[in-house]
Image (spheres, grey):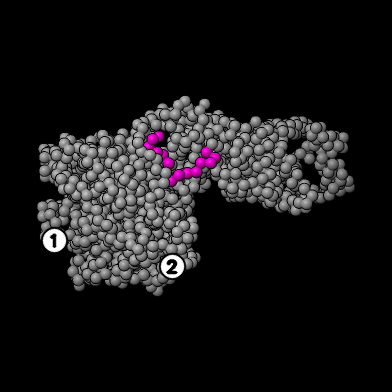
Amino acid sequence: MAKIPVDELSIIQAYGPHLSASIRGTTSDEPEKLVKTHCCFCGQQCGIQLKVRGNDVIGFEPWDEFPFNRGMLCPKGVKRYLQGSHPDRLLTALQRDPTSPSGFRSLDYEQAIARAATEIARLQQAHGHGAIAVLGGASLTTEKTYLLGKFARVCLKTPFIDYNGRLCMVSAGAANKKAFGIDRVTSPWSDMIGTEVLWIAGSNVAECSPITTNYVWQARERGAKVIVQDPRITPIARTCDLYLPVRPGRDAALFAGVLQLMIEHGWIDREFIEAHTSGFEQVADYCRAWTPARTADVTGVPERSIYKAAELWGQAKSSFLLHARGIEHHSNGVQNALGAINLVLASGRIGKPKSGYGTIVGQANGQGGREHGQKCDQLPGLRDISNPDHRKYIASVWGVEERDIPGPGVDAYELFRKIDAGEIKGLISICFNPKISLPDSGFVARALDKLEFYAAIDFFLNDTARHADLVLPGSLQEEDEGTVTQVEGRVIKINKAIQPPGEAREDWRIIQDLAQALGRPKGFTFAGPREIFEELRIASKGGISDYSGITYDKIERQMGVFWPCYANDPKTGAPTPDHPGTPRLFEPDSFNPIAKGAGRFYFADGKARFNVAEHRTPVDDVDDSFPLFLTTGRVVSQFLSGTQTRRIGPLVKQYPTPRIELHPRLAQKLGIADGDWATCETRRGTITLRAMVVTTIRPDTLFIPYHWAGEKSANRVTVAAQDPISKIPQYKVCACRLRKADAAPGYDAKLEAQQ
Amino acid sequence: MTTALLAVLIVAGSRNLAHFDAALVGYTFATLFATFGITYRYAMWLERPPTRMYWRRGWQFFLSPRELPRNLVTATKRAVVEFAGNRFIFRRGVLRGLTHWLIMWGCLVAAAITFPLVWGWIHFETVPGDIESYRTFVFGVAGGEFPVDSFMAFVIFHGLVWASFLVIAGVMLAFRRRMIDHGAAAVQQFGEDILPLILLLAISVTGLMLTVSYTWMKGYAYSFLAILHALTVIFTLLWLPFGKLFHVFQRPAQLGVSFYKEAAARGEQAHCRRCDAPYAGAVMVRDLVTVERELGFRYELEGRAEHYQQICPRCRRAMFGLAQASLWTGHTASSED
Amino acid sequence: MSVPRQLEFFVDPSRCIGCQSCVQACSECDTHKGESMIHLEYVDRGQSVQTVPMVCMHCEQPTCAEVCPADAIKRTGDGVVQSARKPRCIACGNCVMACPFGVPELYIDRQIMMKCDMCYDRTSVGKKPMCATVCPSQALFFGTRAEIDALRPQSTPTNRFRFGSQTITTRVNVMVPRSKSPPLMLDVTAAMDERPENRNVRLNVVGNSPSTIEPMLDPFAEVEV
C-alpha cells in the first residue's frame, strides 16, 4: 500500500523540507579534525576538507592541494556541510501510519528490516522474483552501487534494477560505447589548457559544473576559441567567441551541417579516418543533405555561424569538445552525442595532448555509478549482462551459477510502466526521487500508488518516499567511506567524517541486513566498503572499466587514479602493482585488452566507429496549439530533485523558487511582465510560476529549472518520450504554450519557497 | 580652558581646598592632565571636516525649534536604551553586550565615586552629636545623613568594591573572547585592544587588594598597594585621551548622528543620476560633497552628474564591471597614463 | 600578524559567472561570520547574465576613512583597510556613501559599518581569502604577481582607477587586456552610459589572431516569436 498516508502538507510540516541554519558553529570553534574528502553533489567531485567536532560537521576548509579543483568550490560545495545535523534528518526507521498526524510513526530498526524482508518474501512467493524492483542512484559510492546490483541479482534474483543515471548519463554512455567501445571522457581536464578550440555543446558549465569554468578561462588565456551551443545565453555563452543559438532538439542537425562543411572544405583528417576508423562514408553520405541553408533552417543557427564553427573546428590543430544534458536529454540523445563524436573523429585529433572529448557527468558518481552493475543491462566492469562470457565470469566472482543471474531488466521509466501494469508489486529505492525527477510525474505518482510494498532508504524523507510503507534511515555521504569516479574518470576516495546519527545506518549495512533477514546472507557479509572494493576490483578485472589495479592506498597517494588501472599488464599478464592508471585514452601507442594491439580503440579491430547520427524531430514538437519550446535544467545553487539542497538555508535564499524564463519580445506579445504569475501548459498539464523576462533566451523557448516539488515541479509538464537506445527521457524539449496566470497559484500562500 | 575650569571647580568644590585630600594630589594632577588631553583631542577631532560637519548638523537638527521637544524625548529614550542598556552591542552578541555593559557600568560607578572624592567635591563628616551617623557634603553643601553601621553605609563605602567586581567580570569575559574568538584575534592589536583591558584589570585588582589589606590583613603592605593602585590609575588617566577608552567621549556623537540621519530621511531624497532610484538624503549627499572637496578629493564629473556622489553605490559597482568589460570588447572606458 | 606584501588580490569581473560561491564562502569568515561582505550583482539581469563581484579595493588613500567623522576606519601597515573600529563607529553611513567602489555596508541594528577586510583572519596567517579560494571562475584570484603573470598571458593587472577628475590607487588589482600597453587606468565613470549586452566578450579582442567574425549584437534577432 503505497498511497500517501495523509495530506502532503502535514507530511511537509513534520519532515520538511525545512531550512537549515544559515551557518553552523561560532567564531570560537576549534575543529577536532579536518577530514579530506569530496563534495557530495555533482560529478566534478571537488576536494574539500570537512571540519569535524564530536559527531558534527561544523564547517569546511578548502583543500588547496587536490589537483582537480585546487580549493575551488561552487556555492553548493561551500554550504554542503549544513546538510548534516539537520532538523529533518531521519534518525529512526518510519512506518506508514495514516492515523498519525504526520502520516508516519517510528519503529525499531530491526523490526523495520524484518518487516521489509517479510513483505518482500511474501510478494516474491506469490508473484515470482521479478515482482520486486530495485532503484538505485548515481550519487552512491561505487561500492554501494556494486553491492546493490549484486543484491538485486543474487539475493532478490530480480532482473528489475535500474538507477537514476538513466536520467543523466546514458545517452553519452551509449554513444561512447558505439563509437569507442569504452564509456569514459578521453582526457583529464588539464588537457583543455593549451587547446585551440573548445566546443561546449548543451552544457550550462557555469551553473552545472562551475569548476570547469576556470579550465575554460585558462584555455582562453592560452588562446583557445570557445564555441557554445545552447538555446540560452548562459554565463559561459555570454563571453564565448562563437555562440550557436540552437533551437531545442536540433543538435544532430547542427553537427551534421558542420561536418558537411568540414568535408566540403577538406577540414578533416583523411589519414586518421582511413587508419583508425570505420563507417565514415555512410556518415558523409548522410551529411551531404545538410547544406548550410537547410541546417540553418532546421537549427535556427545563422548560416554564417555554422560556417564559422566549421572553420574554427576544422582548422584547429588541437581541440576539446564537451557536451552534457543539453544535447543528451532527448529522444534523439544518442544520435546527438554521436553527431558530436563524428566531429571529433573527423578532426583526427583524439588521443593527442591538448585534445579531448567527453560528456560532463551530472551526478556525484555519474561515471562510477554506471560501470559496476546497477544499470539494468550491465554487470560489473562495464560488462554486458547478455554476454555469456561476462555472465560466467561474474557468476564465478559471486559464487553463483551463471543461469541464476537474471537477464537484462528494463529502464527506470519502463519499470514504472510495469508497476502501473501491475507486473511489479514491490519496490526498494535508494538515492532516487523519481516523483520529481522523472518526466510526466503525474504518471509516476499514480504508479507509486499501485505498489503493494515500497521501502525507501534515505536520510531525509524525500518526495517519493512519502509514498513508502517503510523508510529505512540511510547515511549521508560524510557518514560513510568509499570511492566514486568523477567526471574525468578519476577514481577518488570519499572519507568518513562522522557516524550516522541515531538509528541511521550506512547504506551498505542496510542492504546487507535485508539480505540477512531474507535468509540469503551469502555474499553479503562484508565488514565494510574496503572489503566490498576488494571484491569489486576482482569483478571489474578484465572488463572494460578495469579497477583491478586500484587500491584505497593508491588513490590517497596519487590523489585519484584514472581507470583503467590494471593489476596485471593486459599485454603480458605480468603483475603491475604500480600501474598509475590511464589519464588519457586512445594515445597512439596505447594497448587495450579488447583490441589487443590492433589499434587504440576498444573494439577487436582497434578502430573507432563513425555512426550515422540522424536528426529526428523531437517527440511532442511545437505546433500551432503549442507553439513554444519548453526546456528544463539546473540553477547553480540547487542539485537534482533538491532533497538535500532545498534543505540548506543559504542555498534556498540564493534562488528560492523556480521561475519561467522568457524573452521580452515573447513577453510583450503575451502581455506578461517580469514578476507576473504565468501559466505554462503542455499536453500533460500546467505549471504556474513567476515570469522572469530576460534577453538571454531564444524568443521561441521557455526555461524552467527542475529542482522543485509538487506544483512547482517542472516535470509535471515534461514529456515521457525516451531515446530508443539509451532510454533517456526527453527533458530538454517539449511543446508548450504560455499565458498570464488568472491568479496567484494556491501553493503560494500555503508553502514556503523550498517546499 | 576646560582644564582651568576643572581646576577652578576643584578649588571651589573643595571649599578652597579645605576638604581636599592632599594624599590624592597625584590623582588630581593626572585628572587635570587627562582633561587637558581629552579636550585637546576632542577639539582636534572636531576640526576634521567630516566631524565638524556632523557636529554642526547634529546640533542643528537636534535644536531645530519644531523638532526639539520630540528630539529631547527621543534622545532620552536612546540614552537609556542604547547607552545605559547597550542594546546595539547586545545585538552583536549577548556575551559581548554583557561584557561591555559590565565594564562600562563598573567604570562609570567607580568614576562617579572617585572623581568627586578626589576633587573634594564630596566628603563625609560625622554628624555633630551623633557619632553613629555620617553626613554627606556635596560641593561643601550638606546632604543627607545615614547611620555608620547601616546597610546604606556598607553599600556606599564599598561602592568601589562593587564597581571593581563589575569591571573584573567584564574584563574576564573580554579576555576570554580575545583569546578564543578567531575573528577578534585576527584584527586585535595590543595597544588598542589588550592594554586597556590590562589597565582596567590592574586598577580593579589593586583597588580590591587595598580593601583586602585594611579589612582583613591589618593594613599589610597598604602603602605599597596604595602606590601601585595610584600608579595604575594615573597611567590610565594619562593614557585616556590617546587610546581606546577615548571612545567614551566620542561615542555620544552617535546620538547626534541619529538626529541628522532622521532629519535627512524625512527630507528630500537624492535620486541616483544613473538609475534614478533614491539612495540617500539629499542633504547628506550635499554635505558629503562639501566634505570631500574640503578634504581635497576631486570626484567632479561632467555629463549627467556633476559629482560622483550623485551616483548610488549599486550603480558604482555596476559601472566598475561595465568599465572593465568594455576594455575587453574594445569600447573606450579606459584612459592611458 | 599582517598580510605579506607580495600577496595580492586580482579581480577579473569578465570571468564572473554569478554563481555566488564567494558570497556563500564570505559568510564563513571569522571576522564577520554569518554576514557576507562581498557584493555580487547582476548589472541588469533583464539584459544580460553579466555579474560584478566587488570586494574592498583597499585604497591607498581611502575615501571612506577620510570622510569618517569618527575616525573609525584605519589602514593597517600591510595596506589593508580594516572594517570600522567598533568602539568608534557611530554608524553614520558616510563611508557607505563615499566609497567610490560602493563597498561598505551599514548594519543599523548593531550600529556598525562592516566591509570586506580581505579575510584578515585568513590572509594574516598565510591563507588565501575565502572568496578567492573558492571562486570557480577565478574571477577572484589571490597570489603573487609572478603567479598571475604566468596564469594570464592575455591579461595584465592595474590598480589605478579614475572617477571624474579623481584618481584612486588601490592595493587590489583589476585585470585588463595585456595587449593594451602602456599600463591602463580603468576609467570607471566613463562607463556611466554603458548598458550590458547579452553577449559581451568578442572574438576580435581575446586571442592574438584577428578574426573575420563580426560581433553579433543580438544572437536572437532572427528568431521569430
The earlier-in-sequence mark between 2 and 1 is: 2
Marks 1 and 2: in contact by CB < 8 Å?
A: no
Task: Give the quarter of the image for residue B21.
Answer: top right
Label 2, residues with CA under 10 Å away: few <14, some 14-19, many ≥20: some
Residue drawn where x is 18% and y is 46% of the image: A284
* Position of residue A530 measured from the top left corner of the image (x, y, whole percent): 25, 48
Above or below for A742 versus A394: below
Residue stretch in magenta? C191-205
Mark 2 is on which residue type?
Leu
| Residue in the picture at 37% in, 41% down | A240
Which residue: 72% across, 40% down? B55
User: Please, which chain is the residue tagged with disc 1 on?
Assistant: A
Q: Tell me the element at label 2.
A: helix
Residue B302: horizontal and vertical position, in percent? 60, 36
Q: Residue at x 37, y 71 (%)?
A: A5
Res. A159 image quadrant: bottom left
- Foreground label between 2 and 1: 2
Tell me the chief SS of the magenta region: loop
Residue C195 painted magenta = yes
Decide if residue A133 is on the left or right side of residue A436: left
Where residue A9 is drawn, which disc sits there? 2
Classed neighbour count for the residue bearing mark 1: other residues with Cα under 10 Å, few (<14), some (14–19), many (≥20): few
Where is residue C23? Give x, y as percent. 47, 45
Q: Amino acid at mark 1?
A: Asp
Q: Is residue A551 visible?
A: no
Query: Does the magenta portion include A249?
Result: no
> Against A513, is C34 above or below?
above
Q: Label 1, on which residue?
A: A404
The N terminus of chain A: image quadrant: bottom left
Locate residue A621 relative to residue A593 in the image: left or right: right
